[in-house]
Amino acid sequence: MVFSRKINNRTYTFGISGRLYKSNVLLYDHQTESLWSQLMEKAISGPLVRSSLKKIPSKRIKWKSWLKKHPASLVLSNETGYRRDYSIDPYEGYYRIGTLLFPVGKVRKDLSGKQRVLGIVINDAAKAYPLQEITRKRGVIQDTIAGTTIHIKTSKEREIISVEDDKGRPVPHIFSYWFAWQAFHPDTTVYTTD
């Protein structure tokens, strides 16, 4: 997910706090040290409490697919001055285990806790789209959330290309684990093909 750094006409810089809320990492801003929930999209403590973050539409695609469309792209260097192998994912083991390291309360049984979902909120109505369901085949899934028709397009490589409304405008969305999505959106519905 991508958020604007501009809040109330002021630009902030953000970092990772190292703290968790409902097993979801909190951000902090360097200017006020307020703590920000990514999934709530707002500050939960500090001088900016209850201030909202503005989500910016973004895409998550494979590097190979990106390079096909943008062959002149540059990437940050791995030469950071620190000894670290950036080809190794430090969370690889966490993805494989079925349990959570930190509790989030009761997890609904609609999906397995660590199933990945695409989450969308429109007019306070939340819906979770299981990635394994919507990327099963290429094409377009059409659905309605709070009276808004959305189109989720997937490529032949089964990547999500876009999430748009009927007028072709991007619909902000978040990729999340089911346990986190449902903890922050307890009344969420779940998309099914039935």
Image: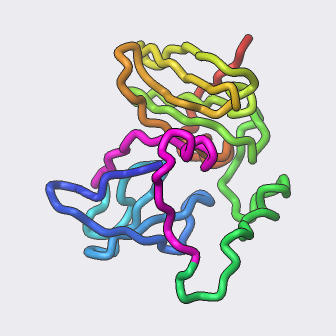
User: Image point 47% across, 18% down: which residue?
Assistant: 150
Query: Where, by quadrant of the figure, is residue 192 drawn?
Result: top right
User: Image point 74% across, 70% down: which residue?
Assistant: 88
Tally the marks: 0
What type of secondary structure mainly makes up the magenta span?
A: loop
Q: What span is in magenta?
A: 51-78
Query: Where, by quadrant of the figure, is residue 32 drawn?
Result: bottom left
Q: How is the image coloured?
A: rainbow
Q: Position of residue 135 (x, y in %)?
A: 70, 28
Q: Position of residue 67 (x, y in %)?
A: 55, 46
The C terminus appears in which quarter of the rendering?
Answer: top right
Q: Nearer the viewer, residue 29 or 142?
A: 142
Farthest residue in the right direction? 97
Farthest residue in the front direction? 72
Relative to 94, say whether 42 is above or below: above
Q: Nearer the viewer, residue 162 or 125?
A: 162
Q: Is residue 148 magenta?
A: no
Q: Position of residue 40 (x, y in %)?
A: 44, 49
Relative to 148, say whether 69 is above or below: below
Residue 141 is left or right of residue 52, and the answer is: right
User: Image point 26% across, 75% down: which residue?
Assistant: 31
Relative to 2, say whether 29 is above or below: below
User: Image point 56% across, 66% down: which residue?
Assistant: 20
Q: Position of residue 54 (x, y in %)?
A: 32, 46
Relative to 64, say whether 92 is above or below: below
Q: Is residue 52 magenta?
A: yes
Residue 190 is left or right of residue 95, and the answer is: left
Farthest residue in the left direction? 9
